[in-house]
Image (cartoon, rainbow, N blue to C red):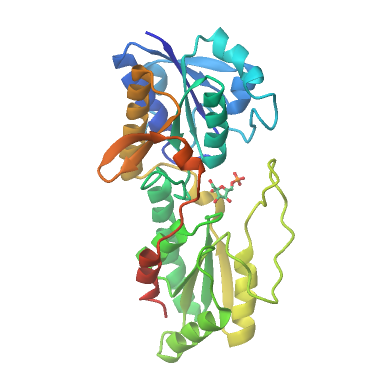
Amino acid sequence: MGVIGVLTAGGDCPGLNAVIRGVVGRAIEHDIEVVGIENGWEGLMQDRTRPLDRNSVRGILGRGGTILGTSRMDPYVHGDGLATCEPTLKRNGIDTLIVIGGDGTLRSAMRLAQEGVGIIGVPKTIDNDIAGTDITFGFQTAVQIATEAIDRLATTAESHNRVIIVEVMGRTKGWIATHAGIAGGADYVIIPEHPYDIDDVVSTLRKRHRSGHHYSIVVVAEGAQPPPGYDAMDLKKDVFGFDRLGGVAYQIADAIEDLTSFETRVSILGHIQRGGTPAASDRVLATRLGVKAADLAAEGATKVMVAVRGPDIVAVPIEEATSSIRGVPDELYNTAETFFG
Ligand code: F6P
């Protein structure tokens, strides 16, 4: 008995539909109804919902995006917090809200939990930087896409004796860049949490080109800083006032070309990394997270987030997700570094 509400908020991510399907499939076993809330927090604030049954989640496991829609609205930024959400919760008889979102979304979910709403968080981002969990769903898909892009860019770079800078997502941490850099054999990886020296990048590439390999691939996370003297472009802001990132690869490319005279090109992968079908590993992970979230709802749990810990899916306090941002450990970056140049 009871009703679960489920919403997806913030940027989309491959595997969202697999989570929704996991929640609905397991909730049915617990005899709990599920109400889907459309367009993230916006639907909760504006009472836009629809029932989700077994039929409504058939055929969605491998589909990209989210069948519920998403938005960048937030009840504490664009409304009066609980007061704005309460009518929808009451009208639908929702006991527990399963919130699938990134750290900002989980922070607002935590505030609602503190005001008495039953909340279970499901961490979501291709950036893989949410604390409290070993990995987030969608990340492995993004790494696969970025790796395939590197493989393709390497052959054209080789044909033309060029340097290609591949910019991947990673707002404050360089998980996609480091993993795709290792998997794609990048000649340099530049990430926000690891300060770099453009002279070292240049000498590494020069050494490589002198050894007879006249092309290079440099992978850059979008949140990296431009080299000194190469000013960042003016970036537009999103609804929360955060920079809409994208383009630092151009400043890095300019610096490399200026300092080496190697012909340099830029390829920004952008939302290609977020769209399309999730990898098999993300479908499995997202399904397990959705199922666990429904189990926790059935137990009456609140203020928790489902998380990956080693081989297990566990419940952790939701604060763990919002207390810090998880960066790439030195050991992982050093592994990429071993193959630079
Ligand atoms: O999900 C996080 C992220 O992928 C960041 O890496 C990126 O900066 C951001 O989303 C872009 O999202 P949008 O273009 O939807 O605002």
Q: Does residue 226 sit above or below 125 in this rendering?
A: below
Does 15 sit left or right of 168 as displayed? left
Image coordinates for residue 190, horizontal then vertical, percent: 51, 68
Quadrant in the picture for residue 73? top right
Q: Tell me which residue sits at (58%, 72%) in the image.
A: 265
Image coordinates for residue 12, horizontal then vertical, percent: 52, 39
Q: Does residue 241 sit above or below 23 in this rendering?
A: below
Does 69 sit left or right of 247 as displayed? left
Does 102 sit left or right of 17 as displayed? right
Image coordinates for residue 200, horizontal then vertical, percent: 51, 82
Viewport quadrant of the N terminus: top left
Identify the residue at the far bottom of this view: 210
Q: Does residue 112 sit above or below 333 in this rendering?
A: above
Image coordinates for residue 134, horizontal then vertical, percent: 36, 47
Residue 4 is at least partly visible in this image: yes
Quadrant in the picture for residue 281? top left
Q: Tell me which residue sits at (50%, 44%) in the image.
A: 323
Q: Does residue 333 sit above or below 83 in this rendering?
A: below
Q: Tell me which residue sits at (65%, 18%) in the image.
A: 83
